[in-house]
Image (cartoon, helix red, strand yellow):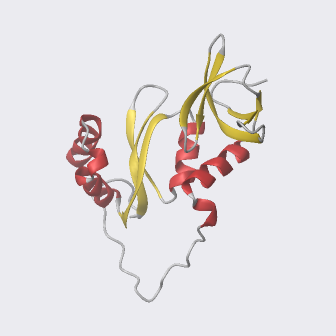
């Protein structure tokens, strides 16, 4: 049985009757179609009669996200120790001065919008989506404190909308 906000596997055929399989997140069920958010393709309304639909695992969904973002072929490089810079002090957030390389925002299921910080884009997006977050907007940023990341978002072209700028302003004022 498939459920909304759970991974789903859709098996169909292309024009040459070749089997194709997609894995995505089921976002809605209507009388005659399913709405599935497929990484790299976006949300698609697919007729219930157009193939087979079955539950998928979060591992399959995570693999699909990694495939879409290309992260499965990227090996983590060891951290350079020779050029290690002292950690920058942050005027925001925790006292342990963590550094981040991913920043953005998301809409919680409660309707609250929050800034988000992480070090790995695909896994953070997957965790947020799995937790019911929507309107997830994350990008890779130069490594820095939360303050540094927010200052980068402030001028980034993809974060010039009023929602993003309001979140940035609130963070910088606190």
Front residue of 93 and 59: 59
* x then y, percent, for residue 148: 29, 60
Figure disc tally:
0
Front residue of 19 and 59: 19
* x then y, percent, for residue 131: 57, 36
* x then y, percent, for residue 80: 48, 83
* x then y, percent, for residue 15: 71, 36
Task: Tell me the residue at 55%/38% (across/down).
Answer: 129
Rendered view: 122 above or below 45: below
Describe residue 157's horizontal placement relative to residue 78 as left or right: left
Q: Residue furthest top?
A: 31
Task: Tell me the residue at 71%/19% (across/down).
Answer: 48
Instruction: Look at the image and tell me in which quarter the C terminus lies.
Output: top left
Task: Tell me the residue at 76%/32% (across/down).
Answer: 55
Quarter-of-image position of residue 44: top right
Task: Tell me the residue at 53%/46% (across/down).
Answer: 125
Rendered view: 116 above or below 76: above
Q: Residue furthest bottom?
A: 82
Rendered view: 39 above or below 152: above
Front residue of 157 and 106: 157
Describe residue 9's horizontal placement relative to residue 145 as left or right: right
Describe residue 122's horizontal placement relative to residue 63 as left or right: left
Instruction: Look at the image and tell me in which quarter the N terminus lies.
Output: top right
Front residue of 165 and 10: 10
């Amino acid at each position: 049985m498939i459920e909304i906000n759970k991974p789903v596997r859709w098996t169909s055929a292309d024009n040459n009757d070749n089997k194709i399989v997609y894995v995505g997140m089921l976002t809605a069920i209507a009388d005659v179609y399913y709405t599935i958010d497929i990484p790299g393709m976006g949300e698609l309304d697919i007729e219930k009669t157009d193939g087979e639909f079955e539950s998928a695992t979060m591992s399959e969904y995570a693999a699909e996200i990694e495939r879409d973002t290309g992260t499965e072929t990227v090996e983590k490089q060891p951290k350079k120790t020779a050029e290690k810079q002292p950690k920058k002090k942050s005027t925001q957030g925790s006292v342990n001065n963590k550094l981040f390389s991913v920043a953005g925002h998301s809409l919680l299921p409660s309707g609250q919008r929050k800034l988000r910080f992480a070090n790995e884009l695909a896994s953070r997006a997957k965790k947020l989506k799995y937790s019911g977050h929507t309107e997830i907007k994350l990008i890779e940023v130069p490594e820095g404190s939360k303050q540094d990341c927010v200052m980068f978002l402030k001028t980034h072209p993809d974060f010039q909308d009023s929602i993003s700028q309001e979140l940035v302003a609130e963070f910088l004022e606190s």
